[in-house]
Image: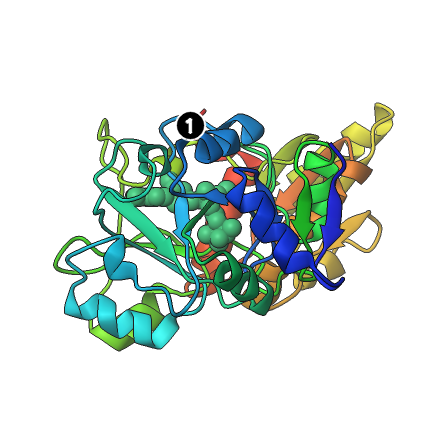
Amino acid sequence: MKTEITGRERGWLERAKEYILSGEVVAFHTETVYGLGANALSDEAVQKIFALKGRPADNPLIAHVHQDFDISTLVDEVPPYAEKLREAFLPGPLTMVFPSKGKVSRFVSCGLDTLAIRVPSSPTAQAFLKEVNLPIAAPSANRSKHVSPVTARHVYEEFAGDIPLIIDGGACSGGIESTVLDCTGEMPLILRAGLVTQEMIAKVVGACGIYERKEGEKPKSPGMAYKHYAPVCKTAYFKVGELEQAKALYIQEESAGGTAYFLAESNVVKLLADYKTLDLGGTGEQMAQRLYAQLRKGEKLATLLIGIEPTAQGGVMDGVLNRMTRAFGRNTNET
Ligand code: TXA
Ligand code: MG
């Protein structure tokens, strides 16, 4: 299959719609990361996504809809706080989980009785979703466990020949995946940290919890149980206080004929003038935006990529630190 990258040429919207209606999988730009979309109403189309990604069958997908889509056709019991959050943050990088009406393919929610809904703000995504006027099930457009894609080129590198179309909307401005928020309880609960932060949500509705999985409990958001976002090269992860150890590992890799790179925030990169580095930037927003692109660059350049944990915390950093921990594999006993 030939894979076309489009988004500006005449007729791309019609072609995207034709592919979706014929059950194909189409990649598309969003403001967070690129998605791998298929008609959420079709069992076969949704199953194709799982096959393409090599995604575990118990990890549910998000249904993406345009901003005028009536979500009450898909979910019920939207609590008053969720209405407020919709008004404040949608369209945007916030995914909300509600009790499902069971209208989409059962493969979308993988047996859960809830459905995750997302209204992306990317104009390219909105144009595509409006054209099809269907809920589009879409995970990030990467092979399962690998780094999420933030350019059309990243998607092409992984899925060329496997999907007919990549809808190019440029580089993703957000850079990490949406915040996933459980809206089935009395208070919203963050299942996955992202660009819409706990502080931002609490400011609008008064309170917002963060879901923590208890020992032995089945996770509320199954995706969080997997090692994820990982580059294909060897990795190591250190705190700034462990920089000497990290340098020793770097030198060991280089002496053995390998290529080592550091991935760190700007202030730390300044301390590593004699080493090869990839700069994450200084602010939380910059680090979110650059993280996946730098991880993908790093895995191409390096045999060993050494991450240095950023020191800033809270806000967007909750999401950035979560992705880094999981990409570099420390503190995770997940498979
Ligand atoms: O920004 C994003 O959210 C991107 C773009 C493409 O929209 N999508 C994305 O999808 O990150 P994915 O499949 O890579 O991650 C979806 C996350 C997973 O952690 C999954 O377990 C969780 O959302 N999820 C989906 N449906 C759920 C549900 N009904 N209940 C709880 N968690 C759910
Ligand atoms: Mg993903």
Which residue position is annotated with label 1?
Answer: 334
| Residue 10 x, y percent position in the rendering | 74, 63
Above or below, 321 against 24 in this view is below
Q: Secondary structure at mark 1?
A: loop
Would residue 269 be seen by someone viewing this image from the given angle? yes
| Residue 180 x, y percent position in the rendering | 36, 53
Nearer the observer, 187 or 311 = 187
Above or below, 146 against 57 in this view is below
Nearer the observer, 179 or 307 = 179
**In which quadrant is the C terminus drawn?**
top left
Amino acid type of the residue that numbered disc 1 sits on in the rendered structure:
Glu
Name which residue lies at 71% across and 45% down: 154
| Residue 175 x, y percent position in the rendering | 58, 58
User: In the visual, does 324 lie left or right of 154?
Assistant: left
User: In the visual, does 5 lie left or right of 209?
Assistant: right
Q: Residues within 10 Å of mark 1 (few under 14, many from 20)?
A: few
Name which residue lies at 73% across and 36% down: 160
Would residue 227 be seen by someone viewing this image from the given angle? no
Nearer the observer, 275 or 141 = 141
Residue 209 appears in which quarter of the rendering?
A: bottom left
Name which residue lies at 54% across and 58% down: 32
User: In the visual, does 10 lie left or right of 328?
Assistant: right
Name which residue lies at 52% across and 65% down: 126
